[in-house]
Amino acid sequence: MAVLEVTSREFRDKQKNFFDLADKGEKVVIKRGKKQAYVLTPIGDEDLYFTPEMLARIDKSILQAKEGKVRKLTPELQKELLGL
């Protein structure tokens, strides 16, 4: 199987065609400038998974939100969280 290299502009202009090729198993590499490249790969259900720990954290977060245990993201808090 050959690797199909396209520029980001070509990809934007003909996205559907490149998605269709990737769906058929073709390897599509999208080049962005001279230093960056990305591989277009379809994902399946087995690629999207949540660990039991992650699900527990999500459940805890939902409960905290329902209980009103949330903080409003202000510009000051954002700077604090990002260490700015």
Image (cartoon, rainbow, N blue to C red):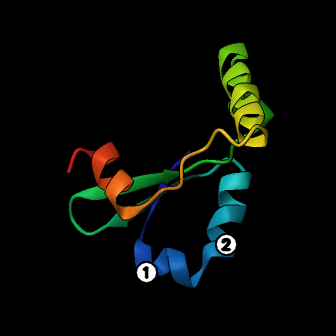
Dot 1, how many residues are within 10 Å of its Cα: few (below 14), some (14-19), or many (20+)? few
Q: Does residue 52 lie above or below 71 as drawn? A: above
The residues tagged by marks 2 and 1 sit, at their Cα atoms, a distance apart of 13 Å
Considering every residue shown, the one lying at the far top of the view is 52
Q: Residue at x 43, y 60 (%)?
A: 74
Horizontal side of residue 2 vs 57, given as left or right: left
Horizontal side of residue 81 vs 71, given as left or right: left
Q: Residue at x 48, y 56 (%)?
A: 73
Q: Which residue is mark 2?
A: 17
Q: Residue at x 53, y 55 (%)?
A: 72
Considering every residue shown, the one lying at the far front of the view is 68
Q: Nearer the viewer, mark 2 or mark 1?
A: 1
Q: Secondary structure at mark 1?
A: helix
Q: Does residue 76 lie above or below 46 as drawn? A: below
**Visible residue check, residue 38:** yes
Q: Mark 2 or 1 closer to N-term? A: 1
Rendered image quadrant of residue 66:
top right
Q: Position of residue 32 (x, y in %)?
A: 33, 67
Q: Position of residue 36 (x, y in %)?
A: 29, 57
Q: Position of residue 83 (x, y in %)?
A: 23, 44
Q: Which residue is mark 1?
A: 9
Dot 2, how many residues are within 10 Å of its Cα: few (below 14), some (14-19), or many (20+)? few
Q: Position of residue 1 (x, y in %)?
A: 56, 45
Q: Does residue 63 lie above or below 37 as drawn? A: above
**Dot 2 amino acid type:** Asn
Horizontal side of residue 42 vs 4, given as left or right: right
Nearer to me, 74 or 44: 74
